[in-house]
């Protein structure tokens, strides 16, 4: 990482990740630029969740400042949002071998990636406790959920957005490719998948009826 001189935009979403993540990236000699860095118990009036509708400012910042990667963590830094990446780096470049675990709302692209490496991808219900339990049961190397939570074998049995962010920066450095190039490589090999998430509000009576 130190040889790549990467420019990283970090959005802690007014939460707790800034000190730890900035320290890791600074030691790795990345140029770190931050937005929404001050602590705010109201999180700037928005939900502190890294999702498409909450990462517009980070997306614009990455484009305007020509950053190599944009990283956002939620309020307590256990989930991660990225501008813009998805990859199979842990197997292909790190040499780790093993299965993967995802919840039922997470992209089925992971099934294709795991199969191409002769591994299995297990599907579990929504809830990270199910992912952690299945990883321990199967000795899987990686588990993730659609909302941006990730854990890796040998690390904690829970979500860690700071560790996941560090792995992504390492991936860029090791591959020597930009995030958009990595995404294109994946789409060229496995095809494209798209997901749209919507939120709805219902009264208690309407929820019961549904």
Image (cartoon, rainbow, N blue to C red):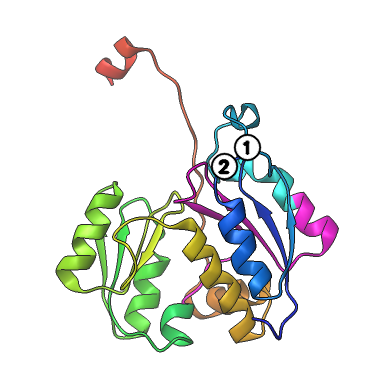
Q: Is residue 172 left or right of residue 195?
A: right
Nearest to the observer: residue 42 or residue 142 = 42
* Residue 184: percent from left, percent from top: 62, 75
Mark 1 is surrounded, within 10 Å at the Cα level, by few (under 14), some (14 to 19) or many (20 or more) other residues, namely: some
* Residue 45: percent from left, percent from top: 63, 26
| Magenta region includes residue 65 | yes
Pointer 1 and pointer 2: residues touching (CB < 8 Å)?
Answer: yes
Residue 26, image quadrant: bottom right
Residue ID for mark 1: 39
Nearest to the observer: residue 50 or residue 19 = 19
Mark 2 is surrounded, within 10 Å at the Cα level, by few (under 14), some (14 to 19) or many (20 or more) other residues, namely: many
Residue ID for mark 2: 15
Q: Residue at x 26, y 73 (%)?
A: 140
Question: Mark 1 or 2 closer to N-term?
Answer: 2
| Magenta region includes residue 94 | no
Q: Residue at x 40, y 89 (%)?
A: 95
Report the quarter where the C terminus lies.
Answer: top left
Helix, strand or loop under label 2:
loop
Observer able to see residue 179: no
* Residue 137: percent from left, percent from top: 15, 67
* Residue 87: percent from left, percent from top: 51, 72
Does residue 148 lie above or below 153 as drawn?
above
Observer able to see residue 60: yes
Does residue 128 lie above or below 109 as drawn?
above
Helix, strand or loop under label 1:
loop
Q: Residue at x 34, y 77 (%)?
A: 114
Q: Is residue 103 left or right of residue 57?
A: left
Residue 116, image quadrant: bottom left
Q: Which residues make up the magenta segment?
A: 60-88
Does residue 202 lie above or below 142 as drawn?
above
């Amino acid at each position: 990482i130190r040889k790549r001189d990467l420019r990283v935009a970090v959005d802690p979403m007014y939460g707790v990740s800034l000190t730890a993540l900035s320290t890791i990236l600074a030691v790795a000699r990345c140029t770190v630029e931050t937005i929404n860095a001050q602590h705010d118990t109201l999180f700037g009036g928005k939900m502190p969740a890294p999702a498409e509708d909450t990462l517009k400012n980070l997306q614009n910042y990455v484009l305007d400042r020509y950053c190599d990667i944009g990283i956002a963590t939620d309020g307590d830094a256990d989930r991660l949002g990225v501008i813009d990446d998805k990859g199979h780096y842990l197997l292909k470049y790190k040499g780790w071998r093993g299965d993967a675990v995802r919840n039922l709302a997470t992209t089925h692209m992971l099934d294709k990636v795991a199969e191409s490496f002769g591994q299995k991808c297990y599907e579990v219900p929504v809830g990270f406790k199910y992912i952690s339990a299945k990883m321990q049961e199967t000795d899987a190397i990686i588990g993730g959920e659609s909302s941006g939570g990730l854990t890796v074998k040998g690390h904690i049995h829970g979500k860690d957005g700071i560790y996941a962010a560090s792995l992504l920066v390492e991936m860029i450095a090791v591959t020597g490719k930009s995030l958009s190039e990595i995404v294109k490589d994946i789409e060229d090999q496995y095809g494209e998948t798209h997901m749209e998430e919507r939120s709805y509000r219902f009264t208690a009576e309407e929820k019961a009826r549904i």
